[in-house]
Amino acid sequence: MSLMKRSLAELVGTFVLVYFGAGAAAITLMIARGASPPSPPNPFNIGIGALGGLGDWFAIGMAFAIAIAASIYALGRISGAHLNPAVTIALWATKRFPVKDVGPYIVAQITGASLASFLFAATVGIDAVSIGGLGATAPFPGITYAQAILAEAIGTFLLMLTIMGVAVDERAPPGWAGLIIGLTVGGIITTTGNIAGASLNPARTFGPYLGDYILGQSSLWHFFPIYIVGPIAGALVAAFLYDYLSGD
Amino acid sequence: MKCYMCSLEKKDTDAVAICIVCGMGVCMDHLVREEVEVWEGGYPFPAKKLKRKLPRILCKPCYSVYHEV
């Protein structure tokens, strides 16, 4: 399979992830618009959770889970369906993925995520940007930069550890990877979404940031290093730790 | 083992292969040999088509059922 075809598959997979996953977050914010703030005011209430508490995060997590599972089952044999620069980098760092493919994969993932955000805005309208923020991730009030990086790192650690255990390891039972990895992301989003958005993926954050910047003139770029450093660090630690634990 | 298809035709022919689907012993005249592509890998790595192919031997009834769409 040519690199171009594989990169195109990565682009499509990441598009699906961001359109349906981040799109679900944007729609949740739009649904919650106008909901009365709790009394006394809760600094964590920025819309998500106003209707259904953690159930909102569960719904967003399930949207990501289904989109990821679908992409893995549809495209996993073509490109590997990394859908995430942190996963690509971790597989390269552990000598499982060729260095010459890393750049094209990451460019494809970022492009797919950006296209998804712009097409989501085109589908829903400007409210998706002004109210939904295109599902962009940012630390919640009271969460420091370091805490956000730590949350993203721990979340991506679990994601990468699961990928290593159910997909990379040849002893893993075949056929389960897409479902289990999708559900793992859904669970991570449900439990840590209200800390820093549970992006776990630099491309997933890049797309909505670019869309918000161009269509809404709102810049969240000062938060972007959180979603580069945290996920990549978490994925690297998980990949090397798994190799250590599973080695003879 | 004798060829089952030949035995139906009242002929006594030694089988040279066994159908991978139904286990019927078949002679050279009643077997169909196909080369099946072999793929290796998959998520999270791209699957690769291997150069070597896997020979698959079927009896004619099973072959016709497989290709009957």
Image (cartoon, coloured by chain):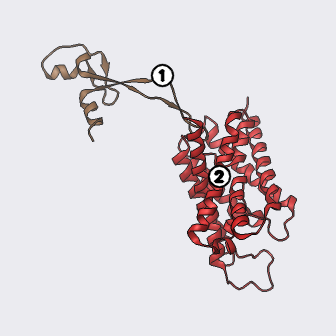
Apparent side of residue A24 relative to residue A40 in the rendered image (left or right)? left
Q: Are marks 2 and 1 in contact (CB under 8 Å)?
A: no
**Crowdedness of circle 1 by 10 Å Cα count: few (<14), some, many (20+)?**
few
Give the residue furthest to the left.
B10
Is residue A207 placed above or below A103 in the rendered structure?
below
Image spot of residue A65 (x, y percent): 60, 57
Residue at figure coordinates x 73%, y 63% from the top left? A137
Q: Which residue is mark 2?
A: A111
The chain holding disc 1 is: B
Find chain B in the image and tell me its colour: brown
Which chain is rendered red in the image? A
Q: Which of label 2 and label 1 is nearer to you?
A: 2
SS at mark 1 in the image: loop
Is residue A83 placed above or below A214 in the rendered structure?
above
Image spot of residue A112 (x, y percent): 62, 53
The residue nearer to you, when weighing B1 against A223, is A223
Q: Amino acid at mark 2?
A: Thr
Residue A130 visible to an observer of this rendering: yes
Residue at figure coordinates x 75%, y 49% from the top left? A157
Q: In the image, which disc is placed on residue B52?
A: 1
Apparent side of residue B58 relative to residue A180 in the rendered image (left or right)? left
Residue at figure coordinates x 64%, y 63% from the top left? A22
Image spot of residue A98 (x, y percent): 68, 33
